Each structure stands twice: as C-alpha cells, then as structure tokens.
Image (cartoon, rainbow, N blue to C red):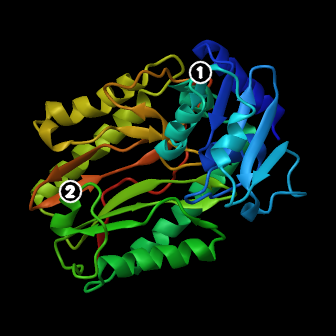
Amino acid sequence: MNTKRIEKVIAGMHGLGISQLLVSSPASVFYLTGRWIQPGERMLAFLVKDNGECCLYANRLFALRGNTDVPLVEFDDTEDCVAVLSESLSDGKIGIDKFWPSQFTIRLMEQRRGIVPVVGSSAVDNARLCKDEDEIRRMMESSRKNDETIEAVIAGLRPGMSETEGADLYAREAAARGASGMSFDPLICYGSNCAEPHHSSDRVTTLKTGDSVIIDVGLVWQDYCSDMTRTVFLGEPTDEQKRVYELVQKANEAGKAAVYPGVPVREVDRAARKVIEDAGYGKYFIHRTGHGIGLECHEYPDVSETGTEICRPGMCFSVEPGIYLPGKFGVRIEDLVCVTEDGAQVLNSVSRELRRIE
C-alpha cells in the first residue's frame, strides 16, 4: 500500500469536503495498493477514510488473501457484497469514483438511507496527475519501445496489406519488444478511412498507391501506457495532402511549444487549433488536442478548449492535432509530452517530417 499516494488522495478529499471515499477504478486501485484487479461484473471497492484508515473490499475469487499488505475484507458470490461494505461506512456524504457501477451505488443508497453519494473522482485524479520520477522513467521507456515498434510497422507496410494486417504487425512487434499489452487496439487506417479519427482497422480496406496512412498506436510497459500517431503516404502525396500534412505538423509543434508550467491546458489546445483555423481548416479539426496518459491511455486532464487544469511539472499528456477531409483522407500527428520545470520534454523521437513509402 502506497501511503504517500493515499495521503495525496486524503488531501483531495479534504478539498471536496468528504471524509470517506470509494475507489473502484482498477488503475486507481493499483495506483494506491500495488495490485491490479479486474473485477468484471463483481464489486471492487477500496475505502479511504480521512483519518488514514483504508480497506479493500474484494471477492474471494481474486485470491488476495496472503498476497497483499492492504487491509482486506472478502466476500463471495453467495453474500450481499454491498451490505458487507456498508457496515464500515458512516452516514453523510461519501465520495464515489466515476467508474463504480450504478448497480452498487443504487443498492448502497437503498440499504443506507443516511448516506449521500457524491462524485469523488477528482481526489484520485489529482493525486495521479503529476507523475513521480519512477512513473516518468517507465513512461519514457514505454514511449521508446513504441517508437521502435512504429518504425517497424512503417518499414513493413506493403501495397495490398489490409488494415488489420497492419494492426497485427504492430501487435507482434510490440510483443517482441517486451510489451505486456497494448494501450488500445491499434488504429491503422488507409485512404478515406483516415478521415474518421477513430476508424477501427478492417480486413476489407487494403493499402494502395496514393493513400495516406494513419498509424495511431501505443503499448504497455511496466504498467504504463504510450501513445503516438504518425501519418505516412504510399507513393508521392498530392499537393493537397502535402499542404494538410504541413499544417498539422505546424499545429503539433505549436501545441508542444505552448506547454510550460503555469499555462492552462486550454492554451495548449488553442495554440495548436489556431494554426489549423487560420489556414481555413478549422471545421476539419474535430476533436480535442490531447488527453492525459499514465496507467491508462486516456486519463485526466482533458487538453481541450474547455480544459480547466494548469500545466504542472510531472503532468503527461498528448498533443495530437489532426485534419480530416471526409471521403478523401486525414492527417494526425501525435506526441506525448511531460511538463518539466522549464517547459516540456517530448517523449517521442520518431520523425515528424513527411514520409513516403515507395
């Protein structure tokens, strides 16, 4: 159990005016206890109280007894798990993270009328926001391995290869470099499919001359995620493809240049978005500029026009502007940055220059 991290969560609880908090996100439970638990449909809850008392409530199927230093209360499928948990709760407000299934929240409210659930996620989100030295080291290595893997994919792309074959290539290359998994399903998109920011790779679309290729991929190494996007072209790109690529490249650089301690994340979004808007392509940049990353590929903060967080040393997030022209093609360039004391460190080293696959 990581007492320093729990102390940070308790400080966040004080800011929310709550004395008890239920944490159910597997990533947050790992962050605080050092144990990954994937509960499926069963209840998982890590109770944190403002006096420092903590307890993990978990099904016996997870075999935690004797394998964790965290105070533990177990139950099995024949017991009312919510009733077991409720015995340790006090009346009044209780913070519940945004991931706890409603079936447990509603049952708790029915069984304990004196309890008032409130969203308490920010207490953990803020604790996880700024990474320590070990976390940053892991993220840097995860990104380094992702850099190597995406280079292998680019080198392996061939005319006639389907999108799923490209995705399978990424998975093999990531595993060969020691990845324990992928941050998300690889997004390998060709041609007009690149105009869909989150197109799922399919078996039907094959690579042909003139296509743009979006490669949006990430792997997990020592529990920490990486995430990067590069766009390449099979053969000589058209003048329009070159123009759009150069704009996205400039937007990516502008966004990264805006990262500095004390700068609101919305200003990072604004810096990248302005490049694209000024060139007349604003309506084709249809998503936020970035997202936080760490134990999960998408975590707090939201780097968008409505983002409220301020850049602080240790924060890690993506800068990923894009332009998507329906029915034609799309371009996205994504890097991860870590805020430092005097700017930002870019975690990716793969070239952002326009690349042609011959």
Mark 2 lies on a secondary structure that is: strand
Q: Amino acid at mark 2?
A: Gly
Residue labelled with disc 2: 330
Residue 346 vertical placement versus 92 (above, below): below
- Which of the numbered marks, if any, corresponds to residue 142? none
Residue 60 is situated, as x and y percent measured from the top left of the image, at 76, 60
Residue 260 vertical placement versus 158 (above, below): above
Q: Decide: few, some or many residues near mark 2? Use Cα within 10 Å; few <14, some 14-19, many ≥20.
A: many
Q: Is residue 136 visible?
A: no
- Looking at the figure, which quarter contains the N terminus? top right
Residue labelled with disc 1: 114
Q: Amino acid at mark 1?
A: Gly
Residue 87 is situated, as x and y percent measured from the top left of the image, at 73, 34
Q: Residue at horizontal 22%, vertical 82%?
A: 204
Mark 2 and mark 1: Cα distance apart in space = 53 Å
Say which label, 2 or 1, has the lower sequence index.
Answer: 1
- Looking at the figure, which quarter contains the C terminus? bottom left
Mark 1 lies on a secondary structure that is: loop
Q: Residue at horizontal 69%, vertical 26%?
A: 9
Question: 41 or 209: nearer the eye?
Answer: 41
Horizontal placement of 221 versus 300: left or right? right
